[in-house]
Image (cartoon, rainbow, N blue to C red):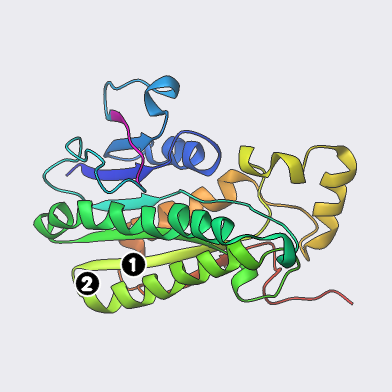
């Protein structure tokens, strides 16, 4: 039976890689972002919509009646010294990362309950568990995501699984300024025990697994896909 999978923010980077991975399986994809229609077209097994998930009045009418998987890909990389971070920075990061995820899940919940079995995948950062300089705002927001994952995994069990992926530096448009030159790329490689920064496919394959029945006994977990950053230090 074909599954209905919702990707919010699924037009570039990790979302694009996840779309390409899921297209190889028996799914219908519902892809939305602030500029989805300018990047993708509806057709075949894809339905596309423009939406700002942080907007309480967003139109979610594109969602199908039954939903078997939801992935919220919205995020931010707002790296500044703590003393330069304003209240606005913290609020904006919280809105993009947490409120967008909350609105997406609340809008999708009736469809997931109707499906009878579903999975949610959210995204965190290695900076929540490992203190990194200039990450105060994004780590605070993603810490909220990790709390949300654990709370919802308890509340929505046994029919809806909720898991997260905590990633490190990954080659996406959002990380362009961190990987914008050969010297920055080399520095990014050296920071990781596996001696390379991440590729979108590294993350998308993990997300695809968590959405699948192969992960049917996994919920409430934060999977580190981070080149070893969270647990290993090369001396």
145 or 233: nearer the eye? Answer: 145
The C terminus: image quadrant: bottom right
Tell me: residue 5, above or below residue 50.
below
Sequence-first tag of 2 and 1:
2
The residue pinned by badge 1 equals 162
Q: Percent x, y for residue 133?
A: 76, 67
Say which residue label 2 marks. Answer: 156
Disc 2/disc 1 C-alpha distance (Å)? 8 Å
State whether residue 206 is above or below residue 40: below
Which stretch is magenta?
47-53
Left or right: where does residue 217 sit relative to residue 116?
right
Q: Is residue 218 left or right of residue 183?
A: left
The quarter of the picture where the N terminus appears is top left
Give the answer, above or below, for where 198 lies relative to 215.
Answer: above
Which percent across, then down, holds residue 56?
27, 49
Q: Secondary structure at mark 2?
A: helix
Which x, y percent locates residue 53?
34, 45
In this view, the residue in front, 35 or 56, is: 56
Residue at horizontal 71%, vertical 68%? 229
């Amino acid at each position: 039976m074909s599954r209905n999978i919702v990707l919010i923010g699924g037009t570039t980077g990790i979302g694009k890689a996840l779309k390409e991975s899921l297209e190889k399986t028996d799914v219908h994809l519902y892809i939305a972002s602030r500029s989805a229609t300018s990047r993708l077209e509806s057709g075949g097994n894809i339905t596309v919509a423009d939406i700002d998930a942080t907007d309480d009045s967003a139109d979610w009418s594109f969602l199908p009646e039954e939903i078997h998987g939801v992935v919220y890909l919205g995020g931010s990389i707002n790296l500044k010294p703590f003393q330069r971070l304003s209240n606005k920075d913290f609020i904006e990061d919280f809105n993009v990362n947490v409120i967008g995820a909350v609105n997406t899940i609340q809008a999708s919940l009736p469809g997931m309950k109707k499906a009878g079995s579903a999975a949610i995948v959210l995204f965190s950062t290695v900076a929540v568990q490992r203190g990194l300089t200039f990450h105060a705002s994004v780590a605070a927001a993603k810490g909220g995501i990790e709390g949300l994952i654990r709370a919802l995994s308890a509340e929505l069990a046994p029919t809806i699984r909720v898991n997260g992926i905590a990633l490190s530096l990954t080659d996406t448009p959002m990380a362009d300024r961190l990987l914008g030159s050969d010297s920055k790329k080399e520095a990014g490689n050296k920071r990781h025990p596996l001696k390379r920064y991440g590729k979108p496919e590294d993350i998308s394959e993990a997300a695809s697994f968590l959405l699948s029945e192969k992960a049917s006994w996994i919920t409430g977990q934060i999977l580190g896909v981070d080149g070893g950053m969270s647990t290993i230090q090369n001396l």
